[in-house]
Image: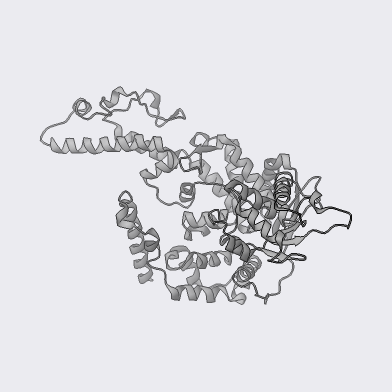
Amino acid sequence: MPSLFLLSIINLSIKKYRDLFNINKEFFKNEQETDELFINSKVILLISKACGDAYSISRSNLPSWCQKLYLDCGFLSRFDSRQLLFKVSFDSRRSLINLQNYLKSKDPNYRETITLEKSMRLKIIVERNKIIEHGLKILDNPVTSRFKGYLEFEYMGEIGNGLGPTIEFYRLITEKLFENKKLWYKTTDKSIYPSIGLNNNKKALKLFKLLGYIIARAIYDDRLLDFPLSRLFWDLILDRSIKLSDIKIIDKDLYNVLNDLTGLIREKNEYIKKNSGKKVSDEELEENILYNGKKLSSVDIYFIFPGYGIELKPNGDNILLCMKNIEEYVNLIYDYLFYKGLNNIIEAFKEGFNIVFDFKKLKCFNSSELEEFIFGNDNQKWEKEILFENLNPEHGYTKKSKIFNDLIKYMLGLSKEEQKQFLIFSTGASRLPVGGFKALSPKLTVVKKTFNKNENPDYFLPTVMTCQNYMKIPEYSSFEIFKEKMNLAMKEGSNEFHLS
């Protein structure tokens, strides 16, 4: 379709132009506006109609133009439309389940019109203190790794089962991978980026394959993760271009050095152009173009990647940086940080990911959108109106109950880290889904925990059923006791599952 091809070219040109003038923000005061230039309401309506056709989805027979729009022309539709297309692009059973879940999230009063047999589920028992080992066993076993139903996890010696322990499995295994500092480059923006020093390390490559599998499985089974993976890593996975200036996201000090060196390259080219009538020697360039007031060759920078001792080229530890080879040095640093130093890691991640589904399905999303629907919402402010509207009091409590309002007061006083702990305690996940509390399914429900007449509620802790986001809170005599008991429950009750 020539018109779509032309729109794609124009859209790509605008993005490249925006990147080119990234240092001059007045060109693009509202970046979102440029991203939404081509969004078409008719295309969105067509996608909604196509995805709402349960018969076509049950036969894996969506129109071919859907695939074209989804993968090649995502800029014509909004994130939620592309997300819906993505959700119904799996096998027919999973696509129908995803369609029903999507319709439920949009309309609380939606009644299921599609009758499905009970979803296939595979229960796997794991040990908390051997979570990585169990993850690798799941990965290596085709029965578990390629299972098309839902994976559910339980813990040895614990009674709990269902959604709560399952969500916690994903949280625990990604936490363990995150805690392995040898795997990660410490970035400027506090995200994590693979260490280039492990590109040929077999044990590390196995862990990156596991990470790819876990992220894909979490997407497939609709589980949220809390893993601060750098957006640049997603760009590399999806074969997107990366600029030299993106280095500042990973290492600001390294970027500042390379930025100074690119400045010297410009000076070098200008000097050669100015003296085009004669041959300019390398010695003359060294004398006239200085790095912080010194000859570049006297700074003792060798062709070794800073901080890793990795040679950028054969015999690199004996090759001194000078004006003659400055361009090569900058290009090799860029290439090693984004390509040559990560190629095996990228392939290992893709290999693990593709066990569940083809990573190319993600190409219609930008890195910010991927972060949202894989890692959830970490930015929504916890405001009284939002909490009051989206928390659900039942069985002994109403929105006028003191305990319900004490809970809201307590939640409003939590720090960012405490909010994360509260979500782990109450839902099993450390982040909210896209849409925040409103999108939480089931809704966070608060009920009255009952006792015998001779028992004092002030002596008991709140309990939760994380598989249903269901909190049982005693009717405490004061807010101070409420706060004390809730803090204790969050601290002591977030790492195991037992009957309440």
Q: Nearer the viewer, residue 336 or 127?
A: 127
Left or right for 30, reference 436: left
Q: Quadrant of the N terminus?
A: bottom left
Residue 265 point in image, percent of width and height = 26, 36
Residue 325 point in image, percent of width and height = 29, 31
Please tell me whether residue 285 is drawn above or below residue 110 in the rendered image.
above
Q: Is residue 59 visible?
A: no
Q: Nearer the viewer, residue 236 or 158?
A: 158
Left or right for 234, reference 243: right
Please tell me whether residue 280 is drawn above or below residue 351 in the rendered image.
above
Q: Residue furthest front?
A: 478
Please tell me whether residue 9 is drawn above or below residue 342 in the rendered image.
below
Q: Nearer the viewer, residue 65 or 491?
A: 491
Residue 287 sits in quarter: top left
Residue sitting at x 69%, y 58%: 150
Count of marks overlaid on the render: 0
Left or right for 42, reference 2: right
Residue 192 point in image, percent of width and height = 52, 42
Q: Residue furthest left?
A: 277
Please tell me whether residue 381 is drawn above or below residue 288 in the rendered image.
below
What's the colour scheme? Answer: one colour
Q: Is residue 209 visible?
A: yes
Residue 302 point in image, percent of width and height = 37, 26
